[in-house]
Image (cartoon, rainbow, N blue to C red):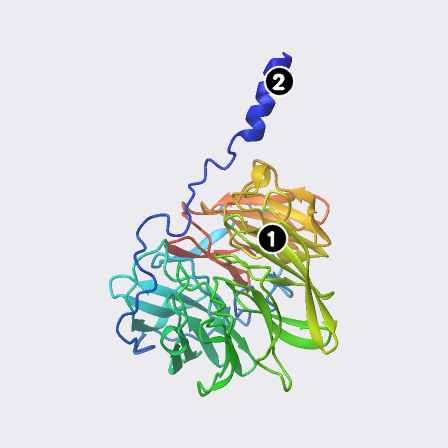
Amino acid sequence: MVAVLAILLFWWMFRDPTRQFTESTPGGDHRGGDSTAVGPPVKIGEKFESFATLTSSLKGTWPRFRGPDYDNIVKNSVPLKNSWSGDDPEIKWSVELGEGHAGPAIYEGKVYVMDYDEAKREDALRCFALEDGKELWRRSYGVSLKRNHGMSRTVPAVTADYILTIGPRCHVMCVKRETGDLVWGIDMVQQYKTEVPLWFTGQCPMIDGNKAILAPGGTSMMIAVDMATGKVLWKTPNPGGIKMSHSSIMPWTFNGKKMYVYSAVGAVLAVSAEGPDEGKILWQSTAWNHAVVAPAPVCFPDGKVFLTAGYGAGSMMIKVTPSGGEYKVDVLKQYPPKDGMACEQQTPVIWDGKMLGIEPKDAGPLRNQLICVDPDDVTKVIWTSGKDSRFGLGPYLIADNKMFVLSDDGTLTMVKPDTKKYIQMAQKKLFDGADAWGPMALADGFLMLRDSKKMYCVKIN
């Protein structure tokens, strides 16, 4: 009997509980080709098609990557249902997209998403009506891409006046939000010698006031561009040759100083966002240096910055300290993925002083589980979703005291973001999806989500 129990224990500890997931690493389909090849000049935004007009009474917004406050949390959500039964939650509409992982943005009844049309070989910013999915217009331009486990991967940044996008090969486009009229464009490969990331651009653009904030990582580490004119306001030198990653810039105000924090390939760094030193590097650390970085940095008020990535990188907690008018950066601790919080694709979310995220596939027994940790020591796991609740590389967000998690295969789970235990409130397989990795968006009770080839609008209120 003891021998049998020992065998069962050994089997349980070392079996692969994620065998039901098909491991789809970027580029794993061997269809990528050369993602850094330079073709003929691209006429950014050269084509426009108008299909319909819309007047909407909806006022909700999800205007950028990670939402209004860059934290994946809706602060003033409409009341959402506490449980699902029957046809709930209902898919209101869906639309076919080119293969990719680009998430949508929402602004007052309209949905904006970057797409790639393989038949026309065009990047396209597409605008849809949030309530019924009718396509209103699209602004596009010709660019040649070879499929590399998806093409478009970025979330537009949207304000009342403008939409800012980055295409798979680092083409930046600014258009008028209401009309789709082209304002300006930048080819970061041509103008800044940007090296296109291995699996195309994952950096989501930022609009800060009247400025576009971008991280080319070529001849200029970061740049600010006037939204109205396209004029470059400042450029951050890049003598260390730091490269663009798949991560996105995060704003952070620390010790009264506003800065832009970026987890690049080669270093993590912060650039001044205000004052006489605007555009200058305030601090950087090459201790964080990994070839593939997708999650954004998570910045805390006390000067700590949490960094994480997949492919064995694990995570690192650094501490930024003001020192004689400058900043000192110390590595507090580095963790292999099996020993603490680590994420491969999505950025952890902070809730009630705790940090929640999905473990990567190389995290041992906790792989692909949703976990909750104390940021003061991310090896202290407070709770996990358990071996029977694994989510692959899927996205998540929080609204109305509920956390919505999308699994790779199109299953939506509603979780109470409790800081003491895992509480699953509801779950439903919405669609037969594949690689449902794209960031979600939520406004006015409409949850936008996607898999690699289709976007869905789901009513959850």
Q: Report helix, strand or loop for mark 1.
A: strand
Choose between 124 and 9: the one closer to the eye. Answer: 9
- In the rendered image of this protein, does residue 219 appear above or below residue 200? below
- In the rendered image of this protein, does residue 253 appear above or below residue 378? below
Q: Amino acid at mark 1?
A: Ser
**Which dot marks residue 5?**
2
Choose between 254 and 438: the one closer to the eye. Answer: 254
Q: Report helix, strand or loop for mark 2.
A: helix
Instruction: Measuring from the top left, give residue 268's x and y in whole percent.
Output: 58, 65
To which residue does mark 1 refer?
315
Local packing at callout 1 (Cα closer than 10 Å; few below 14, some 14-19, many 20+) is many
Q: Amino acid at mark 2?
A: Leu
On the picture, is 53 further left or further right than 376?
left
Q: Count the labels in the image.
A: 2
Name which quarter of the figure residue 177 lies in: bottom left
Instruction: Measuring from the top left, give residue 55's x and y in whole percent.
Output: 45, 75
